[in-house]
C-alpha cells in the first residue's frame, strides 16, 4: 500500500478557494437569470411601471 503525502502551498490553496467561490457565484447567477426568464413567461400581460411614471401625468 502506498502512502501519498500531498501538500498544497498557500498560492495554490487560495487559487482553489477562489475557483470554488467563482463556480458557486457563477451557478447562482445562471440560476437567477433562468428564474427571471421563467417568471417573465408567466407574467407577460403585467407591466411593471415605476411610481410617478404614469401616462396620465403627461
Image (cartoon, grey):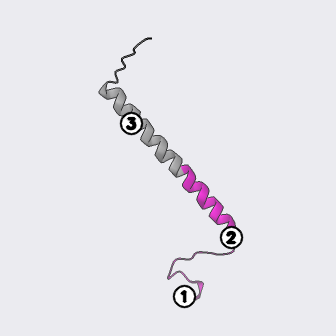
Q: Single out the residue that lies furthest toward the left.
A: 10
> Who comes first in sequence, dot 1 or dot 3?
3
Which mark is nearer the camera, 1 or 2?
Answer: 2
Q: Residue at x 39, y 14 (%)?
A: 3
Q: Position of residue 54 (x, y in %)?
A: 56, 83
> Who comes first in sequence, dot 1 or dot 2?
2
Which mark is nearer the camera, 1 or 3?
Answer: 3
Against 27, residue 57 (above or below) is: below
Q: Is residue 13 left or right of residue 48?
A: left
Which mark is nearer the camera, 3 or 2?
Answer: 3
Against 37, residue 55 (above or below) is: below
Q: Residue at x 36, y 17 (%)?
A: 5
Query: What segment carries the magenta color?
Result: 30-58
Q: Single out the residue that lies furthest toward the bottom.
A: 56
Q: Secondary structure at mark 3?
A: helix
Q: Position of residue 31 (x, y in %)?
A: 57, 52
- Residue 56 lies within the magenta run: yes
Residue that numbered label 1 is attached to = 57
Q: Quadrant of the C terminus?
A: bottom right
Q: Position of residue 11 (x, y in %)?
A: 32, 28
Real-space CA distance between mark 1 and mark 2, rounded to the nearest whole angstrom: 24 Å
Real-space CA distance between mark 3 and mark 2, rounded to the nearest whole angstrom: 41 Å
Residue that numbered label 2 is attached to = 44
Q: Position of residue 37 (x, y in %)?
A: 63, 59
Q: Secondary structure at mark 2?
A: loop
Amino acid at each position: 500500500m502506498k502512502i501519498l503525502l500531498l501538500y498544497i502551498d498557500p498560492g495554490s490553496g487560495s487559487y482553489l478557494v477562489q475557483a470554488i467561490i467563482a463556480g458557486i457565484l457563477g451557478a447562482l447567477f445562471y440560476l437567477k437569470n433562468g428564474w427571471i426568464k421563467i417568471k417573465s413567461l408567466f407574467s407577460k400581460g403585467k407591466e411593471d411601471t415605476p411610481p410617478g411614471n404614469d401616462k396620465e401625468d403627461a
